[in-house]
Amino acid sequence: MADEDFYSDLSHGALLKQMSLAELRTAIDAGTWETNDPTKHANAKEIIRRHEEAAALAASSKRDAREEETLSISKSALSIAKDANRIASEDLAVARDNAKSARKSADAAERNSRWALYAAITAVVAAAIATKDQILALIFGQP
């Protein structure tokens, strides 16, 4: 039964409708609301119960909506995190391949520099042998 029907069925419904919920609750708690008529007293308590039930239902609906929104946000965040993880894994694989290639290049460069050193030493020795007569003449003053 709707609240409007409940109020209209009561002989004192108009009075109850005019009172705020806080006023009605205060009157019942203070014992000033229709203490000699148990039906009116019960009706007032029923109105309070219905309002509290409606408030609890509204709060529950809001909580459910917040939980759904939180769940939706969490699912979205999980999806983004999975994509980020996949991209990071792919980038890591590429970085490892690049590091492996760089290591091979560094090893080749080290070998090449070693051969260049040997070639330079060989060139110095060859130059010394080719000019040995001039070196000896310079040292010992021989023509």
Image: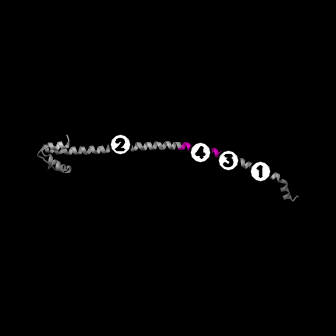
Q: CA distance from mark 4 to mark 3?
A: 16 Å
Check disc 3 and report its element: helix, strand or loop.
helix
Three-letter amino acid code of the residue under disc 1: Ala
What residue did someone put label 2 on? 68
Which dot marks residue 99? 4
> Does 106 lie within the magenta span?
yes
Q: Is residue 28 left or right of residue 110?
A: left
Three-letter amino acid code of the residue under disc 3: Glu
Check disc 1 and report its element: helix, strand or loop.
helix
What residue did someone put label 3 on? 110
Check disc 2 and report its element: helix, strand or loop.
helix
Three-letter amino acid code of the residue under disc 4: Ala
Q: Residues within 10 Å of mark 4 (few under 14, many from 20)?
A: few
Three-letter amino acid code of the residue under disc 2: Glu
Q: Residues within 10 Å of mark 2 (few under 14, many from 20)?
A: few
Q: Are marks 1 and 3 in contact (CB under 8 Å)?
A: no
Q: Residues within 10 Å of mark 3 (few under 14, many from 20)?
A: few
Q: Earlier in the sequence, mark 1 or mark 2?
A: 2
Instruction: Name the residue: 83% across, 53% down.
Output: 132
Residue 130: image x %, image y %? Answer: 82, 52
The kind of secondary structure the magenta stretch mainly shows is: helix
Q: Earlier in the sequence, mark 4 or mark 3?
A: 4
Give the magenta part as a residue range. 91-107
What residue did someone put label 1 on? 123
Which dot marks residue 84? none
Instruction: Name the residue: 20% across, 45% down.
Output: 48
Q: Earlier in the sequence, mark 3 or mark 2?
A: 2
- Quadrant for the N terminus in the image: top left
Label tally = 4
